[in-house]
Image (cartoon, rainbow, N blue to C red):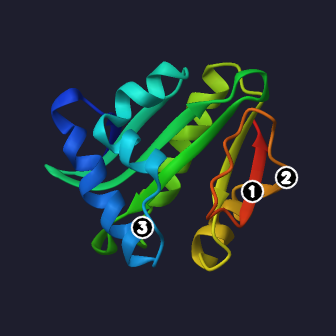
Amino acid sequence: MLTIAPMTTDQTHEFAAIWIPWLEGMGRVVEAEDAAIMADPATYYRASGGEAFLARIGEETVGAVAVKGLGASGFEFCKLVVTEAARGHGAGRALVEQCLDFAAEHGGPALYLQSFKTLDVALGLYERMGFADAPAPPEMNVLARTQVIMAKPV
């Protein structure tokens, strides 16, 4: 059974253990900001008013995502990844829904994301969930690797 919950201190390594290999496997560079965040994702995202979440099936971590506070603009979901074995089973959608719920519960008004054009499956999911191309809000730190910015009102 799939569960999604805020990351605990003893799970810090699990976020980086699935996210960094995925990023490198996409041929992308781990930027300085990425390395700093992966040292303690929960603390980093909570400091902005956000949260870090892990998806688990039983005792196995199969996905991760974080929500970053963007002040008056709302929130951004970051670092979404689902392991190869868990893809196609709803974990990605469930993680995005968790982020939408979090943003709505904490006053929105929108949830943003940054992505790559090559992630057709993910971009299709975001579109089906109501995300659309949008300009970056002033509070968003747009990474050098970003090719797509989308948002959805919450």
Write the residue at 55% across / 23% down: 48
> Where the C terminus falls, by quadrant?
top right
Nearer mark to the viewer, of 2 and 3: 3
Q: Position of residue 55 (x, y in %)?
A: 33, 48
- The residue that mark 1 highlights is 149
Decide which of 34, 70 is in the foreground and name it: 34
Q: Position of residue 120 (x, y in %)?
A: 63, 78
- Give amino acid for label 1: Ile
* Contact between labelled residues 2 and 1, with CB atoms less than 8 Å apart: yes
Q: CA distance from mark 1 to mark 2?
A: 6 Å
Tell me if residue 55 comes above or below residue 119 in the rendering.
above
Q: Position of residue 122 (x, y in %)?
A: 59, 69
Q: Is residue 67 left or right of residue 17?
A: right
**Callout 2: SS:** loop
Does residue 1 appear in the picture of this structure?
Answer: no
- The residue that mark 2 highlights is 134
User: Where, by quadrant of the figure, is residue 41 drawn?
Assistant: top left
Specify few, some or many for label 1: CA neighbours under 10 Å numbering under 14, 14-19, or 20 or more: some
Write the residue at 47% across / 30% down: 45
Write the residue at 61% across / 64% down: 145
Q: Position of residue 56 (x, y in %)?
A: 26, 50
